[in-house]
């Protein structure tokens, strides 16, 4: 039986402890603020440092290295050097939100993807939880984590904007959630470019201008940014527009869309 000790009894650490305990690992009592960490690596096959990113190096340095114990951090954006001077180091970052220990523990065993690096113990942990692994080396971990934040935090931020704009019309967020879920499903099935619909994809600039006239002043900058992302997707990295955008009239009924077009109305 694999023995693990976790430093950090917060959402991530407690979620992982419960999930690994349910998977048959021997999970030692969690350590937190005020505990002596010097011998934390002793008696464990793996020591997980589940603390905020900016505290990982300090906590790792407080632990006396043990050559038989792998030290693992859960940070998405950090490389393995933050765990020096431990001889066996690894990273394990679950691509799933852990809002609280109960939900987190269930999600960790639901077949999610784990970004791993370093010592094989991280892949063993992912496998024990029934997950799949994505090997992410140090030099691209910041890019990986940025993509993860866009996929989770930014999507939630956009739904916050949906809630505010809909609320200005007296409408509930719940009415728009099936649309959001279907769009995410379509992006996974067709790819983001194939799933894109709406006025930006069609080159319907008058509709976009009406939106800017209607939405509250404080929402306009974020809305313009969203339109910019949709246009970037519609045009594509190779500069080739989707048919609906390529065939849209550039004069008359719809004005040609220079970058400043959406900044005219403020």
Image: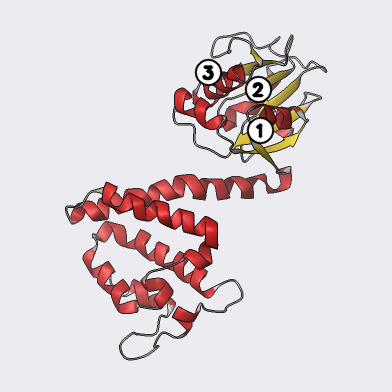
Number of the label disc, if any, that sits on residue 92:
1
Pick the front one: 79 or 58 = 79
Q: Residue at x 34, y 78 (%)?
A: 205
* Relative image position of residue 238 (x, y in whole percent): 61, 75
Whether the residues at callouts 3 and 2 have beta carbons within 8 Å, the answer is no
Query: In the rendered image, which residue does mark 2 sit on?
Result: 48
Q: Is residue 154 left or right of residue 120?
A: left
Whether the residues at callouts 2 and 1 have beta carbons within 8 Å, the answer is yes
- Image quarter in which the N terminus is found: top right
User: Dot 3: few (<14), some (14–19), or many (≥20) neighbours within 10 Å?
Assistant: some
User: Dot 1: few (<14), some (14–19), or many (≥20) neighbours within 10 Å?
Assistant: many
User: Dot 2: few (<14), some (14–19), or many (≥20) neighbours within 10 Å?
Assistant: many
Residue 62 to residue 57: above or below = above
Q: Earlier in the sequence, mark 3 or mark 2?
A: 3
Query: In the rendered image, which residue does mark 3 sit on?
Result: 9
> Would you identify the image quadrant in which residue 35 lies?
top right
Q: In 3D space, how far apart are the residues under numbered discs 1 and 3 (Cα atoms)?
A: 17 Å
Q: Earlier in the sequence, mark 2 or mark 1?
A: 2
* Relative image position of residue 236 (x, y in whole percent): 56, 72
Q: Is residue 86 left or right of residue 182?
A: right
Q: Residue at x 25, y 55 (%)?
A: 165
* Relative image position of residue 199 (x, y in whole percent): 36, 72
Q: Earlier in the sequence, mark 1 or mark 3?
A: 3
Whether the residues at callouts 1 and 3 have beta carbons within 8 Å, the answer is no
Pick the front one: 68 or 18 = 18
Q: Residue at x 72, y 47 (%)?
A: 139
The number of numbered discs placed on residues in the rendered structure image is: 3
Asked if residue 79 shows in the view, the reply is no
**Disc 1 secondary structure class:** strand
Residue projecting furthest to the bottom: 252
**Disc 2 secondary structure class:** strand
């Amino acid at each position: 039986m694999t023995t693990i000790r976790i430093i950090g009894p917060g959402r991530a650490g407690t979620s992982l402890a419960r999930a690994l305990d349910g998977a048959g690992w021997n999970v030692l009592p969690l350590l937190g603020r005020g505990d002596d960490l010097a011998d934390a690596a002793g008696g464990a096959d793996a020591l997980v440092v589940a603390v905020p990113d900016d505290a990982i190096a300090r906590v790792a340095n407080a632990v006396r290295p043990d050559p038989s114990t792998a030290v693992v951090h859960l940070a998405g954006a950090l490389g393995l050097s933050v765990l020096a001077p431990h001889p066996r180091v690894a990273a394990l970052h679950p691509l799933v939100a852990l809002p609280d220990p109960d939900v987190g523990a269930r999600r960790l065993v639901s077949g999610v993807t784990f970004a791993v690096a370093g010592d094989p113990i991280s892949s063993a942990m992912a496998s024990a939880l029934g997950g799949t692994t994505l090997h992410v080396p140090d030099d691209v971990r910041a890019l990986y984590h940025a993509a993860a934040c866009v996929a989770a935090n930014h999507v939630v931020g956009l739904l916050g904007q949906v809630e505010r704009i809909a609320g200005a019309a007296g409408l509930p967020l719940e009415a728009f959630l099936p649309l959001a879920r279907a769009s995410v499903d379509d992006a996974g099935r067709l790819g983001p470019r194939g799933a894109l619909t709406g006025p930006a994809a069609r080159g319907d600039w008058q509709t976009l201008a009406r939106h800017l006239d209607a939405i509250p002043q404080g929402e306009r900058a974020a809305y313009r940014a969203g339109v910019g992302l949709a246009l970037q997707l519609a045009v594509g990295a190779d500069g080739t527009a989707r048919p609906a955008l390529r065939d849209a009239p550039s004069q008359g009924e719809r004005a040609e869309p220079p970058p400043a077009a959406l900044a005219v109305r403020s």
